[in-house]
Structures are given as structure tokens and as C-alpha cells.
Image (cartoon, rainbow, N blue to C red):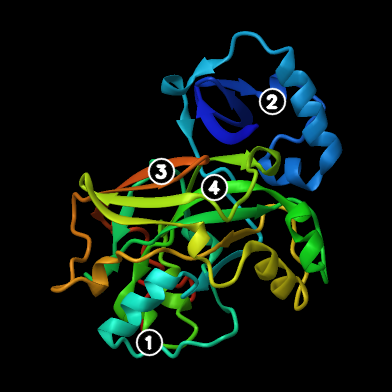
Amino acid sequence: MKLVTFTASGRTAIGAVTNGVVFDLGTLAPGLPSTMRGFLDAGAPALAHARDSLARARGGLSLDEVRLEAPVPNPRKFLGLGGNTRSHLAEVQAAGVPIRHSPHQTWFNKQVTCVAGPRDDIHMPAMSRELDYEGEMAMVIGTRCRNVAIEDALDVVAGYMACNDVSVRDWQLRAPTATLGKSFDTHGPTGPWIVTADEIADPHQLSIKAWVNGELRMDGGTHEFLHGCREMIAELSSVFTLEPGDILTTGSPAGVGALMKPPRFLEIGDVVRVEVGGVGWIENRVVEAPAGYLYRSPLRPGGGSP
């Protein structure tokens, strides 16, 4: 089943996609939670109810009639695993990038305000032009869990998505955590849907491709992982509780713009497409970051510094 969060006629809902048709799960099964995180929190009974309702569904909306949102718009956690494919590690080492490789899993936070939808714009930061892409497969956790054994780890996965781990390279290298360079607003496009785990026979046999303006830049796959999906979940859950809707993005193959000679960072107007075989694709255009809001302190007339 392909689970989506979508907006149509000014209303946002969760649904399921079958043969290019979107069915509103709130209409099909009124007792289901109305948000993706609530749906995942409800667990296996909600999933079974959705499947049963979908089998009897009629009508629906075409994909052209809806706006696909990030499948999980408000995850509690969004974590990324760095240096996790053989080809990407090789290109980093060949370029002499000052990142120390560790035999252990190297995780970083992407702050959840970076979440963006599968067709949303990516903002070029005002303070840097070292904007880069990383096509990846993302896991979505479906079960609240702690201390998960490796052999049980895939049982806690709700499903899989495509993800662009957008990175601002100079900010990424400011500190070993990489968090600031990974967390700019709009720099976590995901989607286009969650393909439920029962439809993916082996998450370690999926292709990962990325194009910039139609030019293939990444052509690898999850078979390159240095740490597999089971090991990722076992490692993280040994430290803290994983919760439904948490996003784990799992590492990109070679082909990032920063390591090309010369570097080829993203520019305004570029379109990045990331496709994960058996899951789907997302496509996002780079635009100048809007001015946004300017905070003015209510404690000082006119705001700003005294």
C-alpha cells in the first residue's frame, strides 16, 4: 500500500494510492486517525482497517487533482546516517575531505522543520551557495520500540520513501555533528508516499538514482550499505526509543556535486529528481530563499538590539 498525505480543495488528509488514484482514508474509514503520525501510532489494526476499506473503494481522485505533501509532515525525529555506502565513502576519501571515517555508525540530526514535500521547492540559503543533493532511501518507523534485536528490526518499519538529504556543505563542516548543514528549512524533501514494508521484499536491493536538470548524477543502490537497515535500527534503539513516524535516512551513493572536479553545487532554477527503485521519485526545484519573517522583540520598541 502507498500511504500519502495530500491536500485537495483546501483540505489536508491522509490517503492511499492505487493505480494513480488517491483514496481519502478518512472518507473510506471514518474511524481512522486523520494524520499520518496518528495513523502510524494506531499500529497494525489501523493498517488492516485501511487495507480492508481500500479493497472496497470506488471513485477517488487522480494524482493530478491533489497536492502531495510530505508523507510524515511532523516526525518526532529525523535522523541521517553519514558515509554509509561504499561508493560515497570512496569518493570522499579520494577527494581528501577532512571527515574521519569511523567503523561505527555516524548519525546526525536533521531538525524536523526541514521536512518538505515531494514537489516542494528547495530554498537556496542566503548565507551560502554550497548547496548539494544526496539521493537516499528513507525508512519510516511504525512501532514504538527500544532495544530491538537485529533479527526483529525490519518488523518495526512501517515503510520506505525516497529522500533528498539536502546539505549545505560549508555549514556541514563547521562541526562534527553536521547538524546545522543538514537542517535548513526545506532541506528534507521526502515522498512521494510511504510504500508499506510488506511491498518491499528486501530494502537492501533497491536502486538509488539522482538527476540534476535531467543529467544522471547518482546511480547506485542500497546494496552498497556498510551498515544494513537492521543494524541501523538495532543501534539507534539501543540508545533511545524509536517512535511511529520517525524518519531514518540511510546514506547516498557516489555522485554528490561537492566532490566533482570542479565542484558542481546546485544553482537557482536547478531541478533535482531522486528515485528509489520500487518506492518512487521526488522532484524539487531550487529557488532563492524567501526573506521569511523578521523577529522583533516585544520588549524593545522597534525590536532589534538596544
Say whether disc 4 or disc 2 marks the residue closer to the N-terminus.
2
Say whether disc 1 or disc 2 marks the residue closer to the N-terminus.
2
User: Which amino acid, by three-letter code, is at mark 4?
Assistant: Met
Secondary element type, mark 3: strand
Secondary element type, mark 1: loop
Q: Tag 3: Cα neighbours inside 10 Å, few (<14), some, or many (≥20)?
A: many
Please say whether residue 261 is visible from this viewpoint: yes
Q: Quadrant of residue 75?
A: bottom right
Determine the residue positioned at 74% across, 45% down: 40
Q: Which residue is identified by label 1?
A: 174
Say whether disc 2 or disc 3 marks the residue closer to the N-terminus.
2
Q: Which residue is identified by label 3?
A: 282
Q: Quadrant of residue 173?
A: bottom left
Cα separation between marks 4 and 3: 9 Å
User: Which amino acid, by three-letter code, is at mark 3?
Assistant: Ile
Say whether disc 4 or disc 1 marks the residue closer to the N-terminus.
4
Discs 3/1, front: 3
x and y percent of residue 51 in the render? 75, 26
Apparent side of residue 31 relative to residue 198 in the rendered image (left or right):
right
Determine the residue positioned at 76% across, 61% down: 153
Is 6 situated above or below 254? Answer: above
Please say whether residue 126 is visible from this viewpoint: no
Q: Nearer the viewer, residue 254 or 48?
A: 254
